[in-house]
Amino acid sequence: MQFSHSDAIWQVFPELRAGALFAEGIDAAADVEEAVASFSAIAEARLAEAQESEFPEIQAWRRGFSRMGLKPTQYRSASEALLRRFRQEHALPRLHPLIDLCNAISLAFAIPVAVFDTENIAGDLQVRHATGHETYLTFSGQSEYPLPDEVIFADDEGRAHARRWTNRQSGLSAVRETTRSVLIVAEALHAGAGEDTASLVATLADALARHWSVTAATAALSQASPRFAFQV
């Protein structure tokens, strides 16, 4: 299996840097509360000094959304949406230990983190522009159809696993109690994105080793090294 960004994405967003991780042996029994509290505290301290809209990581994604023709206060990156909710409520809902952990790490780094159940991905997964023929399944079970040129995560069967890039994931490959193998992707556009996404992935790999006793395969992606191949 392979994860990548299309050449067209790299041409429009040459500053993009991404980190990817694949892991097997995930379950819903891990206790991640201490780790979640630790990462949440990092976000809490940062939000005490400035709102998320002032973070360079968030500002870069806002500029990216504008470049995609989207109003950045209408469609937010996943990290901005999480930080905004966290600032207002000082907590996030608990969904699954892995999702709770990834959400907390996303808060701490202010970088969007996408988590996919690989068993529900057909073939390879690529961030690319939609053709207008892809299908997207919402969390409520409704089918949507991304517009032509919308940036999506698409598999080989033309199923969109995320819409508007880092805005909204699909219910099709969402992590559930039955999930055992996952692909996790962190993407950033700000200055220093390469170092920050690498640090995020290393932090996540360490957390997976501690909480699930799994060894993850990881990769740093750039225009010079745009693909992550792994065995499922």
Image (cartoon, grey):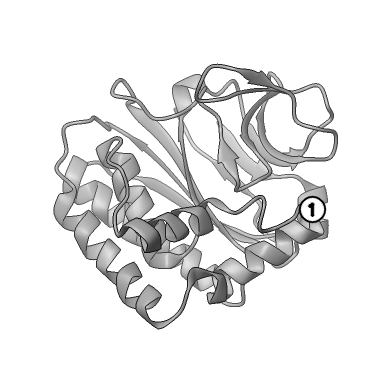
Measuring 58% from the left and 40% from the top, which residue is drawn there? 168
Residues 43 and 99: in front is 43
Measuring 74% from the left and 55% from the top, which residue is drawn there? 71
Residues 193 and 132: in front is 132
Q: Amino acid at mark 1?
A: Met
119 vs 215: above or below: above
Residue identifier under label 1 = 68
Measuring 22% from the left and 48% from the top, which residue is drawn there? 209
Q: Is residue 201 visible?
A: no
Q: Secondary structure at mark 1?
A: loop
Compared across the picture, whether 226 is left or right of 130 comes to left
Percent position of residue 76, x then y: 61, 53
Percent position of residue 61, x then y: 64, 62
Compared across the picture, whether 180 is left or right of 156 comes to left
Q: Quadrant of the C terminus?
A: top left
Q: Quadrant of residue 100?
A: top left
Percent position of residue 112, x then y: 51, 54
